Amino acid sequence: MQIPKEGDYVAIKSYKHDGSLHRTWRDTMVLKTSDDAIIGCNDHTLVTESDGRRWVTREPAVLFFHRHFWFNVIAMIRDNGVSYYCNLASPMTIDQEALKYIDYDLDVKVFPDGDKRLLDVDEYEAHSKQWHYPQTTDRILKANVNTLVDWIDHGKGPFSQAYIDLWYERYQQLSHRV
């Protein structure tokens, strides 16, 4: 597939290890693409859960996806500061339909005050047994938790306020051109 260009909209689809659809985000504006990464933003976008439930995001979010790292980052821009929701997930792929990844349950949430929490460890353990996650996948995911925490602790990439400001401003510029 042709890599989307700045200003294009893409859907995002997350799957579970068994191949089942987990969640779909309808419209994310692409802000930057490279051979390895896509940066996007969405605001009040429709999300559809695997059971058919639908909801709309409450705030703008800058999103970071990579072809090599086993995590993606959602930086939610809120009145009290930026909150991050980081999915431990397969590296992204993209095709004509959507940007796609496998969600491996583990999440790291970072609050505006910098406090961070590892979430859904029980869900990860249950799905690991249910779907027989390979040991290599388990090792890769645990190593990527460490990489992710290092990025958070050092304000690297999407964990820099300047990064969020830059890409959210670009989103606002592109949104007003439409």
Image (spheres, rainbow, N blue to C red):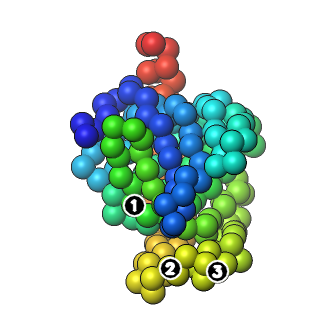
> Left of 152 or right of it: where is 118?
right
Identify the residue shown where x is 42% and y is 41%: 98
Report if residue 30 is visible in the image.
yes
Q: Who comes first in sequence, dot 1 or dot 2?
A: 1
Q: Position of residue 14 (x, y in %)?
A: 52, 52
Q: Amino acid at mark 2?
A: Tyr
Q: Amino acid at mark 1?
A: Pro
Q: Quadrant of the N terminus?
A: top left
Give the crowd class for mark 2: few <14, some 14-19, many >=20 residues within 10 Å.
some
Residue linked to disc 3 = 125
Identify the residue shown where x is 56% and y is 39%: 25
> Left of 118 or right of it: where is 73?
left
Identify the residue shown where x is 24% and y is 37%: 2
Q: Name the residue nearer the viewer: 105 or 60.
A: 105
Q: Provide the secondary structure element on which disc 2 rests.
A: loop
* Image vertical order of residue 160 relative to residue 143, above or below: above
In the rendered image, the residue lying farthest to the bottom is 135
Give the crowd class for mark 3: few <14, some 14-19, many >=20 residues within 10 Å.
some
Kindly report the distance in space between the C-alpha atoms of the residues bearing marks 1 and 2.
Answer: 16 Å
Label 1–label 3 contact, CB within 8 A: no
Residue linked to disc 1 = 91
Q: Position of residue 86 (x, y in %)?
A: 57, 59
Kindly report the distance in space between the C-alpha atoms of the residues bearing marks 1 and 3.
Answer: 20 Å
* Image vertical order of residue 115 relative to residue 44, above or below: below
Residue linked to disc 2 = 133
Kindly report the distance in space between the C-alpha atoms of the residues bearing marks 3 and 2.
Answer: 9 Å
